[in-house]
Every structure is written in C-alpha cells, then in structure tokens.
Amino acid sequence: MVEQGTKEASLYERVDDKVRCFLCERRCLISEGEKGFCGIRINVGNTLQTLVFGNVPALESISLEINQFYHFWPGSMALTFSSWSCNFQCSWCQNWQLSGIRPQPDRAKFTTPEDLVKTALTTRDQGICASFTEPTLSHEFNCSCFELSRKEGLYNCYVSNGYMTLEALEMLRKCGLDAINLDIKGDPGVYKEHLDGLKAKVIWRNAKKSKELGIHVEMVNLVITDVNDDVNCLNWIIEQHLKNLGPETPLHFTGYLPTYTFNNPATRIETLEKAWKLAKKAGILYPYIGNVPGHTASNTYCPTCGKLLIERGTYGVLRYEITLEKKCPDCNRSIPITGEYIRD
C-alpha cells in the first residue's frame, strides 16, 4: 500500500544502486533507504519518492503584495500554500516553523490539487502561490496544482530561493508558472560563509532564464545586519540585477528581524534607504523597501515624471493611478505591469 503523501518523484536518474536527484542544484546522490539533503525525497527500491505530495501545513488567502509581487496583478489575492523543509539552512529564516522541520505524518494536512484549486475558486482568489517554505521541494504537487489552476483561469506564482535546476524551472513553466519572486541572499562570500558554499550565480542564472521563458520576475534581498549590508555586497547585487534582468525588473530590499537561531540587530531603516539609493543611482527604475510599513519607497513612481502611481499599505494597494493601457497618466510612459489591477 502506498503511504499517503508518497509519490514517485520526477527529475532523477539511477546511478548503479543509487539515485541522483536533479530537482535542485545540490543534485544529491542518494543511497537505498536514504533521503536527500532536504529530507523530502527518499530512495525506495532504486526509485526516488517524494514524501510531501499534498502535505500542506499552511494554506491562506493573502494579498499578493505581501508575497512581494509589486508589478504582477496588483491588488489581487492569492491562495498561498506550503509544505515542509528546505534545501537551504538559513539561520535567520523567517518561516523556520515550517522550513526547519522535516515532514511529519502525524502533523500532516493532506489536500489534493483539485481541492486546493477548488478552494481558490471558492474564496474568489485570482491565483495561487507556492510560498512560506521553499516550493521547489514540492515540485510534483505544485505542477499538478498549476496545471489545474491555469485551466480555471487563475495565475500561478512562486516565492523561492532560486536554487532549482534548469530542468525543474522549464518544467514549471510548462505546467503553468506565471511569476516568480527570487530571494538573493547576498554576494558569493555570503553564500560561502553562511550557506554551505552554495553558488550565488545559480540564482541569477535562473532569474535570467525565467525572463527568457516569459515568466514575470521580481528579486528580493533580505538585508541582514553585518551579513550582507555592506556597500560592496549591495553594489554586487545591484550590478548582477542590471546585468541579468535589466533596469525595469523590480528589486526589493527588505528589513530583517532577529529570529530562529540568528540574533544580529534588526536592519536599520537607514541601511535599507542606503540600498535603495544605490540601486536608484545605478539605474534600477523600480527599487523598493519592504518590511517597513508606510515607507514611501514601498510605492511605485513614474521613472520619467515622478508621479505616484501605486500607493501601498501594510496589506496591499491603497491607490492605483496607472491607465488601462499600463501607462503613466501624466507623461504617458509605459509601466511594466503584468496582469490587471484588481479593485476591492
């Protein structure tokens, strides 16, 4: 009998008596009975199995702006869901209650892709969003949900650390992924010191590839005191952003608070403002400051005439002044918005 939540995984190959997972760029080589780094995928009889198909501990309708999409379906609501665990081990993780825990059958809340999409339709959400923990690890479930969601006219989005393989990214696009928010932790030194030596270039590669595939992209940098808040690190992120994504792709600098096992002081607003100014000076047209309620840099302004186009509050859009043709009403500049504005 197949245990609930267990399903043969995609994206793996057999290597003698082991299996190699190529869902994320860790590309774990897994022996019989063993699990990969994330604890989500297990080798059973030389077959890779996922342990979390339909295991959804968090499910909530929230504003898409809370998921830090500012140029994608403004004002809309997304049924946002997660599973367990992560392929990173960030000591400052904001969602450690989910990402720091391996799947626990006794705590499981199972749902089917059909029921998840039905819930989104019932709650009148405009789309669904895989978030809270690293969605890459729930790849098979997410793909099933996205295929059904697309048929119902809903959008599909991801909030991710960006460490999936190109094969996984391309498969997601085929299944219906419309938008992705990628979290860049810092420069290569940050990844080396704090993230097991993982490669920062993978995130930029996947961000660039996402744009080439027609996926809406926004980047987020959680600015952490004495980790990635120095000018050199911020400038490296800005340089890579312009090189790989161009000036019109939004870049969010968000504030950190001490949590999980990390106790450095909270990010100073002045530090976030420094990052914002550096990005603006370098030519990024839509830099933002996040996790600072009421800050004017959470709004969207016309890069040409400076008109306030989108005013945002803690939970979403307060005012929207972009025309139906997605232009500034004062100077007629085109503003890169994907989707339509959803009014209350």
Image (cartoon, helix red, strand yellow):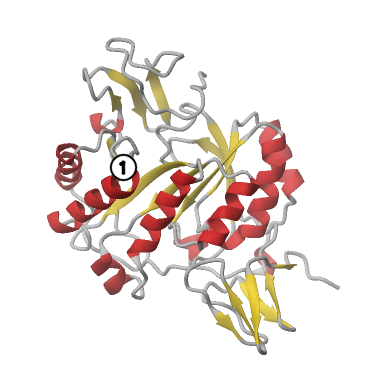
Residue situated furthest front in the rendering:
212
> Toward which corner of the image does residue 168 lie, by quadrant?
bottom right
Q: Is residue 299 visible?
A: yes
Name the quadrant of the N terminus. bottom right
Judge whether 245 appears above or below 230 on screen.
above
Q: The residue under label 1 is which amino acid type?
A: Leu
Is residue 1 positioned above or below 236 on the image? Answer: below
Q: Residue furthest top?
A: 330
Q: Residue 280's x, y, as percent?
A: 19, 37
Q: How many marks?
A: 1
Q: Is residue 94 visible?
A: no
Please name the residue that numbered disc 1 is placed on.
Answer: 251
Mark 1 Cα within 10 Å, few/some/many (few <14, many 20+)?
many
From the viewer's perspective, tell me whether residue 333 is left or right of residue 278: right
Residue 337: give x, y in percent of width and height: 42, 28
Q: Is residue 224 left or right of residue 21?
A: left
328 to the left or right of 342: left
- Please state the horizontal and vertical placement of residue 343, each as a whole percent of the image: 51, 18
The residue that appears at 47% across and 30% down in the rendered structure is: 338
Observer-nearest of 279 and 208: 208
Instruction: Tell me what residue is drawn at x 45 percent, y 51 percent.
Output: 209
Q: Nearer the viewer, residue 220 or 47?
A: 47
Residue 192 image-quadrant placement: bottom left
The residue positioned farthest toward the bottom in the image shown:
17
Q: Residue 108 placed where, x, y %? A: 68, 62
29 versus 178 height, above or below: below
In the displayed image of the protein, which residue is found farthest to the right? 1
Helix, strand or loop status at disc 1: strand
